Image: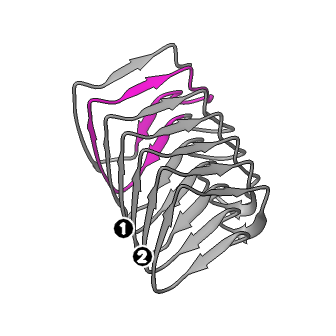
Amino acid sequence: GGGVYNAGTLTIINSTVSSSSGSYGGGIYNSGTLTITNSTILSNSAILFGGGGINNAGTLTITNSTISNNNASTVSEYGGGGIYNRGTLSMMDSTLFNNSVSSMGGGIYNYDYGTTSITNSTLSSNSAGTAGGGIYNTGSLTLINDTFSNGSAPSGGGIVNGGSKILNYSNTIIANSM
């Protein structure tokens, strides 16, 4: 974690994590319990994956926050320009905007063991070099009342759901994604 490393319990409120870099998790690396509220994760970069942050077998709750302009220039098959998740991620009333990755999951890469739930949120203008401009999912993903727009990737500008992985969604819009 270039900006924050958490292996315990941490709450970030009304704060900004910006312009940080690291190999894993440009802005944040979490393997504990992390709550982010009314905050901004902005312009961070990762060499491997998780430009904005990584949730590695931890619990991450994001509420009323913005994750934008983060980048992961991964040399591996993994990605996550905004977030790389292989734990439990809950995001509500938040925005992922203009994040990018050279491989998969411009907004979020939800890895095999990851469980992600997104409610009342917007994923817009995120891009991936290979697949999943908005989200690349190989775990369990639930979307409720969300909007995906202007995502881009050679395969699945909005969402790519890998194989027989779990994808549940309701009242979700995917528009102008290529």
Which residue is most to the bottom? 8
- The quarter of the picture where the N terminus appears is bottom right
Q: Is residue 172 left or right of residue 112?
A: left
Density class for disc 2 (Cα within 10 Å; few <14, some 14-19, many ≥20) is some
**Quadrant in the picture for residue 111:** bottom left
Density class for disc 1 (Cα within 10 Å; few <14, some 14-19, many ≥20) is some
- The quarter of the picture where the C terminus appears is top right
Q: Is residue 130 left or right of residue 66?
A: right
Say which mark, if any, is on residue 113. 1
Question: How many numbered discs, if any?
Answer: 2
Q: Secondary structure at mark 1?
A: loop
**Quadrant in the picture for residue 92:** top left
Which comes before the other along the chain, label 1 or label 2? Answer: 2
Report the span colored magenta: 134-161
Q: Nearer the viewer, mark 1 or mark 2?
A: 2
Question: In the rendered view, would you say 155 is above or below 82?
Answer: above
Cβ atoms at labels 1 and 2 below 8 Å apart: yes
Residue at (66% x, 47% y) in the render = 103
Look at the image and tell me whether residue 127 can be seen: yes
Report x, y in % for residue 40. 59, 49
Please, what is the three-letter code of the amino acid marked with disc 2?
Answer: Ala
